[in-house]
Amino acid sequence: MTPRPPVRINAPALVLRVMANILQGPKILLTKVANGQIESSVGVTVGAVCVVMAPVLFISAAADFWNRGDDGVELLILGLVVGLIGLAVLGVSRFPSGLPVARLFVAFVAGAFASLIVATAAHYFSSAVTSLDVAVAEAASTVSGTNASVIQAETLSLGITLFRSLGQWLSAAAIIVVVVRIMPHLGVGGLDADGGVVTRSARRLAPKSGSTMIRLLALYAALTGVLLVAYGVAGMSFVESLVHALTTISSGGFSTRSGSIGAFGSVAIEWIAICGMVIAGTSLPLIFRALQQKDMSRFGRSVEFRAYVGLIVAAVVTTLAWSSQWPNESNVREAVFSVISAISTTGFYSSELRSTAYGAESILLILMLIGGMSASVAGGFKVIRLMVLGKYIRRELRRSIHPAMVEKIHLGRSSIGDVAMSRIIGELFLAIMIILPMAMLFSADGLNFKAAFSFAISSLSNVGFAFGLDRTDQHLQALGAIGHIAAAMLMMIGRISATPVFVALGGIGEPAQREIRRLRLRRKQKVIR
């Protein structure tokens, strides 16, 4: 019996069916809106982001009018438009009663990119930038809390300066919400309910997650106020104190001067910035508990905090050892500043780093990758992940000698489940898969390999400064339009985390994948017949 030839998929028909399914979306949406509110986590998230961003634009516009700047009208109009859009979207959307993890990630990513669009518009319609790609890159630096810019800080109007610093502060405040709402599903900073230090420490603050968020946000605002007063006492003006307080505690790194903190030439300001950056990289729930119970020994009992401080001390000692000069107060302060700026992912710098020894540069890059503690506003891989990964490697090495051995990974008093462990390993490999092609793209767009690789790591970790060029902050300026867009996406992925981004991208392509699966199933059925 002669077998029937296989049925080939008709490519034009496949494209038409996929397009038809996509075009049905607006029709279904309009029908649901006509019948009342639609259940959409994306709509609620995007609407909430717009409603929150509108007052920021109004405050920035008022500051610009007061200072007789050039961007007040644009910021005011944009604030009205964004606010109306947010209210309209919230008016037709309601949060669904049941929300799968995949849709939660999609809503998270949609909210982040909604803030990116608003920040891009604020930069593009102001006098700050002249091209769209630069506006996108500056907006990504604002939203992601990265100290990378192509703009001279002194040339910005007060309105845009305040908008950028408030944007970095709010993005870190959003991370606090993510710690309580999203991290339990993501395993970031480490761990979820299966074996998680992050979630447990946050949930122990209050029985309900809403109360937890309010307490952590109140602590965050209080720490900002303390830094505001400290910078003012050290000699900064009120505007400079406000901007640096907002960008220090948020680990953002924007400054009112092109030379960053080093441009002030003040030892007191540098030490205040060092203290602020250490706090930014420390777990907020840990700080809250220690202050609430007046028990500073909690820091010493925290396994992750001991590792965090140990990394800082070891990096400072190693950096000084690689230096060609005998350590003095200035060298020690500069080494401490650079190390803490890297591990807290703030991105401040007190001096140009081109004279830093090659070994010290490697140390700073490693610290950028590691980042701060879990449940902090810092970026990076997180200290707790590094600790868990080290224990995992140790266990696997022991298993290679004793194959029948059964051993759980423990961190302090918590045990780490296999699900959380696989997520940590997956996040690490996703980061590697992102950094390498981006470094190649930056290299093709004009950077040498050292500058491209260090800037890729710095952007993904939301730091900003890098190595390989004459100036510490020159990397984004040296890139073209493609490099600006790529750097912006890298910053956003670093702030959001790779897992939600890839899950959201998978959700976007789901209709096409579903149609392809249907056609393959029909093909198999025809062959069987």
Image (spheres, helix red, strand yellow):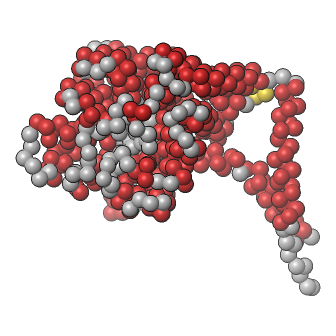
Point out the image quarter for the C terminus: bottom right
- Of 333 and 96, which appears nearest the observer? 333
- Identified at 40% across, 38% down, the residue is 152
Occupied quadrant, residue 102: top right
Does residue 99 sit above or below 499 in this rendering?
above
Q: Is residue 319 visible?
A: yes
The residue drawn where x is 28% and y is 29% is 273
Q: Nearer the viewer, residue 207 or 51?
A: 51
Q: Compare residues 48 and 404 and report the one nearer the observer.
A: 48
Viewer-side residue, 515 vs 451: 451
- Rendering coords of residue 293 (x, y %): 31, 14
Residue at far bottom of view? 1
Q: Is residue 156 left or right of residue 386?
A: right
The image shows residue 217 at horizontal and vertical percentages of 46, 19
Q: Residue visible at 22% across and 51% down?
A: 356
Q: Quadrant of residue 11?
A: bottom right
On the rendered structure, is 474 left or right of 333? right
Residue 94 seen in this snapshot: no
Name the residue: 62% across, 46% down: 503
Which quarter of the figure is the N terminus placed in?
bottom right
The vertical placement of 294 against 499, above or below, is above
Residue 251 spot, x, y in % from top left: 38, 33
Q: Position of residue 244 (x, y in %)?
A: 35, 26
Q: Is residue 160 left or right of residue 350?
A: right
Image quadrant in which you'd find residue 14: bottom right
Q: Look at the picture and state if 132 lies above or below 231.
A: below
- How many numbered circles are shown? 0
